[in-house]
Amino acid sequence: MRLLSHLFALLALLVLAAQPLAAQSVLRDAETEAFLDEITAPLVEAAGLEPGNVEMVLINDPSLNAFVAGGQAIYLHSGLIDAADSANEVQGVIAHELGHITGGHINRIGEGYAKAGNISLLSMLAGIGAALAGSTDAAMGLMMAGQSAAISSVLSFTRTQEASADAAGAEYLSRAGISGRGSLSFFGKLLNMEMRRGFSQDEEAGFWRTHPLSGDRISTLRGTYEKDPAWNKPSDPALEARFQRVKAKLMGYVAKPEHTLRDYPESDTSTPALVARAYAYHKQAKMELALGTADMLIERAPADPYFLELKGQVLLESGRPDEALDYLRKATDLSRSEPLIASLFGHALIATEDETNYEEAERVLRASVGRDRYNPFAWYQLGVVYAARGDMPRARLASAEQQVMKREYALAMRSAQAAEAGLPVGSPDWLRAQDIGMQARALLEQQCEVSKDRSCRRRR
């Protein structure tokens, strides 16, 4: 029974691992993304990767986790940011994930499963042979032993990869001149969490884990980190202050307002606390409190684009888009047209319902998607502008861009075909409509093949 429980546990693990990333919610925020890019940059360089080619993605998930899922993208759960006490801890996690990327671990996971499959198949053949020879007990024993060996092979493979990523992460921190104290501190959090949940740290428990025992990882890494010249190097105070702002903003955005106000009470007048409370008040529809708190932040830093963005967002979402324009225009200018801020500004221009603002909205939104094509909200707003101006082919093209990102492939294909029919032949937009149509068709066929859903083929 114990072996069967492990088999079912592994099966559940594999099923969860196969869940599409799109099933999880991606959080996008200009300030947070800029911060994550900044703390990642020296580690990317230390890992020998091209700057700007590693993408940081924040997932709205309260669990304490981070992972890579192919390509050069690192996914951080919001729960990890909430649990971290410093930017240095987050850098330790990022360094580890970079170790998975440089080690090609996602691409090589098939090797581990293939080896396990071979072991399982051989044990099954041996069991069948024993059964044919009349020894059913021996046959069952051979098959069960083979399944156990197969599971052990997969888990051993993943533990080896994790240990390799730990070592690579330590190397990248060292090359970047970043202390490993944060890495050890974060592993300590993992160890405490495991112990609170009753996870054993003994040798037998380690046999059934996908990761090495947290206590063993700490022991191994401590010896490496304490010898490193950067061990006693202090963290950058400005970077740590920005982390506290990002962490507070994230809590204000995703947590229940009462939880935010508990952790950041009115007696706390620090900048992170004001940021967190502004979002909490906004979620409670206490707009005057939210706007007053935003004003306090702007008074402290009048040229901070993120504080101006905050006030503009509160005004816009309170039904006062005309009042939001000056704040969002200034935030866009100060951030050098950061795409997410610019798309919010474009939305505000449209929300005024003043047709004289549509030309500026189109210009702002086109610049936004030109720098960040993967923003369905900006494409939707751009489609609204085109439709309002009577340019239906480009409105449909914008809809196709948005729909393919939302995995609405059948709709995207139809929108792209309609756009292509109305656009000048050979124009850049006409060519883009063709590209989206072909992309949507290929993805829809892939979706149909995976789901084995015959009806989805008829919907094309």
Image (tube, rainbow, N blue to C red):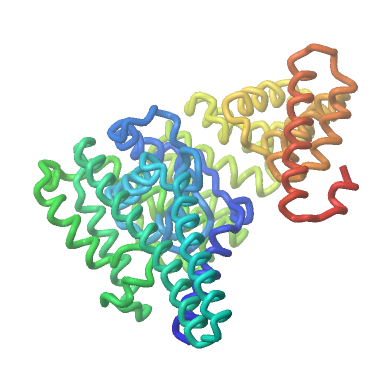
Percent x, y of residue 203: 26, 75
> Residue 8 placed where, x, y %?
53, 76
Q: Nearer the viewer, residue 63 or 171?
A: 171
As drawn, which residue projects farthest toward the front?
133
Residue 348 in sight here: no
Is 35 located above or below residue 438 in the figure?
Answer: below
Q: Is residue 237 above or below residue 121?
A: above
Q: Where is residue 261 shown, x and y percent of the image?
A: 45, 65
Name the residue at 73% across, 48% down: 447
Nearest the eye: 68 or 80 = 68
Q: Is residue 448 visible?
A: yes
Image-based side of 9 in relation to 102, left or right: right
Relative to the observer, which residue lies in front, 376 or 188? 188
Residue shown at the point (50%, 66%) measured from the top left? 120
For image coordinates 30% across by 50% down, the residue present is 164
- Which percent across, then down, holds residue 183? 26, 53
The quarter of the picture where the C terminus appears is top right
In percent of the image, x 66 and y 27: which residue is there? 365
Relative placement, left or right, of 67 versus 394 is left
